[in-house]
Image (tube, helix red, strand yellow):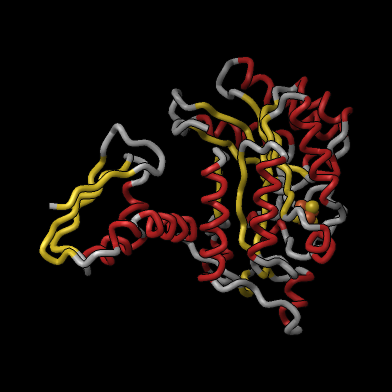
């Protein structure tokens, strides 16, 4: 996904979802209880288009529920409303999120007709025991089969994962990440498990039967998972939930590793590991200049200049500069 990409999100909170995953209260997570009608969906698209620069690649994204669990006619009504915008090239395609067990040949053939390009599956874990404890209602095989079908039909596959679900360990989460790579995903999202009110997980937490990850552990696990994805050219679309007002006010968030800058904290740690080779020596008499790509310079400096401050313990002066030749996580440095 390029830098000039924008999604027009349409949230369909828990619409038609007969499941109750123990962590899920989609109403609180999307901070929206109302399900947009077809007319409102059109208005949301028009309103958003008016604010997005015309050189952006724009997708309409149906998030929040299990889109393909809706009756076929309802799915088609939502997809049809986007088609005029695709015809006029204001919108390039559609993306949607759903469950692995709601993928069939019939559904995929229908989605193909309506310019759906990306299908994201909430995999959450590929460990059968974690899936069972989380009340997901599907197993690892369902994720593998759905992934294979989605790719056979030529869609781009996204697989979302959660860390810190009941029974989860760092090793199990890393295996889930490896499976996401092996199942052929091109994109992923990593969500640390949070305890949201009015969920079965909240009940477990209140009874002392579930302990969420600490923020430090969540950062540590995510750092290694994120690094594995980068190494395998998987695009990480999101890390952690977006800070909506319910979470920042702690209205619905009971516990868990929520931080408004969670992704920045993870990327700072990834860069701290990378910069270890220049952090080893005490060079109090020397300066150091570190060169990174345009995209990564702030992450290299670190959240609240964390990495720069650490380097300043070792060097007289520390400079971070952009080198336009460098891409991704490449960096060079010179001491003088
Ligand atoms: S399937 Fe998705 S929408 Fe339904 S309860 Fe689970 S996480 Fe929530």
Using the image as rendered, state which of residue 126 and residue 7 is in the foreground. 126
Find the residue positioned furthest to the top: 87
Q: How many marks?
A: 0
Q: Residue furthest bottom?
A: 208
The correct choice, above or below, for 135 with respect to 323 in the image is below
Q: Quadrant of residue 278?
A: bottom left
For ligand 1, which image quadrant applies? bottom right
Residue 37: image location, x then y, percent:
74, 39
Between 93 and 313, the residue placed more toward the observer is 313
Q: Residue 189's x, y, as percent?
A: 61, 48
Q: Quadrant of residue 222?
A: bottom right
Tell me if residue 193 can be seen: no
Q: Position of residue 205 (x, y in %)?
A: 72, 78
Q: What residue appears at the point 44 percent right and 33 percent down from the top-left corner?
A: 3
In the depicted structure, whether residue 173 falls above or below residue 235: below
Residue shown at 73% from the left, 84% from the top? 208
- Say which residue appears at 33% left-offset and 40% top-offset: 293
Q: Is residue 51 visible?
A: yes
Q: Along the line of sight, which residue is nearer the eye, 230 or 199?
A: 230
Q: Nearer the viewer, residue 164 or 35?
A: 164
Residue occupying the point 13% across, 63% down: 316
Image position, residue 26 (x, y; %): 71, 56
Q: Is residue 194 above or below residue 35?
A: below
User: Is 173 left or right of 238, judged from the image as shown?
Assistant: right
Residue 182 in the image: above or below residue 94 = below
């Amino acid at each position: 996904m390029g830098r000039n990409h924008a999604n027009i999100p349409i949230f369909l909170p828990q619409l038609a979802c007969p499941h109750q995953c123990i962590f899920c209260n989609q109403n609180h997570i999307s901070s929206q209880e109302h399900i947009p009608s077809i007319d409102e969906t059109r208005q949301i698209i028009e309103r958003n288009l008016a604010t997005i620069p015309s050189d952006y690649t724009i997708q309409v994204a149906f998030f929040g529920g299990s889109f393909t669990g809706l009756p076929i006619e309802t799915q088609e009504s939502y997809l049809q409303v986007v088609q005029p915008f695709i015809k006029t090239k204001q919108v390039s395609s559609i993306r949607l999120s759903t469950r692995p067990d709601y993928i069939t040949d019939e559904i995929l053939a229908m989605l193909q007709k309506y310019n759906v390009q990306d299908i994201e599956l909430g995999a959450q874990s590929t460990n059968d025991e974690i899936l069972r404890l989380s009340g997901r209602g599907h197993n690892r095989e369902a994720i593998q089969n759905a992934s294979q079908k989605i790719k056979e039909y030529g869609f781009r596959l996204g697989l979302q994962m959660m860390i810190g679900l009941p029974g989860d360990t760092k090793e199990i989460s890393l295996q889930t990440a490896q499976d996401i790579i092996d199942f052929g995903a091109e994109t992923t999202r990593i969500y640390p498990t949070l305890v949201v009110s009015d969920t079965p997980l909240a009940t477990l937490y209140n009874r002392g039967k579930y302990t969420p990850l600490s923020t430090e552990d969540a950062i540590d696990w995510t750092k290694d998972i994120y690094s594995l994805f980068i190494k395998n050219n998987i695009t990480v679309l999101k890390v952690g939930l977006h800070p909506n007002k319910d979470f920042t006010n702690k209205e619905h968030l009971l516990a868990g590793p929520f931080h408004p800058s969670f992704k920045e904290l993870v990327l700072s740690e990834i860069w701290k590991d990378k910069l270890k080779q220049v952090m080893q020596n005490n060079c109090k008499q020397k300066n150091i200049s570190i060169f990174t790509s345009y995209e990564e310079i702030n992450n290299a400096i670190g959240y609240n200049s964390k990495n720069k401050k650490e380097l300043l313990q070792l060097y007289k002066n520390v400079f971070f500069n952009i080198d336009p030749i460098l891409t991704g996580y490449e960096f060079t440095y010179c001491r003088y």
